[in-house]
Image (cartoon, rainbow, N blue to C red):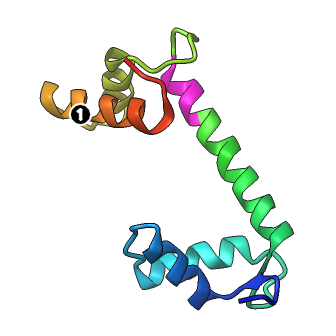
Amino acid sequence: DANSYVDVDELRVCLIRQGHSPDGALLAQSFSAMDANKDGKISFSEFVAYTSRQEELLRRMFDEIDTSRTGKVTAAELRAALHRMSIRVDDRRLRRMVQQMAHGAGSGD
């Protein structure tokens, strides 16, 4: 609504509109992480701070995977990263993962 804050129900509706199926516990956890002052609503500044932290986390994760430091994640780098996490994927699944990353972010091999 026009009150310049987002409550948990508005966040749920937004996520659903974006094609997500928010789990109750995960939604509560995410909302709590965004609601820095714990007043039961997310202000724009709280939202920006949260997304900035998430962006930094994603950047560190990407940099850890991009061992060649090219700014792109190759299938080999992704396979090695998954292997370090004891996650095994077959070639077909790995290709789909790389294609999804390339389609969504404009990078990847």
x and y percentages locating residue 74 in the rendered image: 39, 17
Prevailing secondary structure of the magenta residues: helix
For the C terminus, the image quarter is top left
Q: Nearer the viewer, residue 17 or 76?
A: 17
Q: Residues within 10 Å of mark 1 (few under 14, many from 20)?
A: few
Total of numbered circles in the picture?
1
- Identify the residue shown where x is 46% and y is 82%: 25
Vertical side of 22 occupied by 80: above or below? above
Q: Is residue 33 above or below residue 81?
A: below
Residue sitting at x 37%, y 74%: 21
Residue 50 among those drawn in magenta: no
Using the image as rendered, state which of residue 85 and residue 45 is in the foreground: 45
- The image quadrant where one finds the N terminus is bottom right
**Residue at (68, 71) in percent of width and height:** 33
Determine whether the residue tagged by mark 1 lies in a helix, strand or loop: helix
Q: 62 or 44: which is nearer to us?
A: 44
The amino acid at mark 1 is Arg
State which quadrant residue 77 falls in. Answer: top left
Q: Is residue 34 left or right of residue 19?
A: right
Residue 28 pos. (x, y %): 55, 82
Q: Which residues are magenta?
A: 61-66
- Give x and y (percent) for residue 70: 56, 10
Left or right of residue 101, residue 58 in this image: right
Question: Looking at the image, which residue is at 67% across and 45% down?
Answer: 55
Residue 31 lies in quadrant: bottom right
Residue 84 horizontal/vertical position (percent):
36, 29
- Camera sees residue 39: yes
Asked if residue 76 is positioned above or below residue 106 in the image, the reply reads above
The residue singled out by tag 1 in the image is 96
**Does the rendering let one see residue 90?**
no
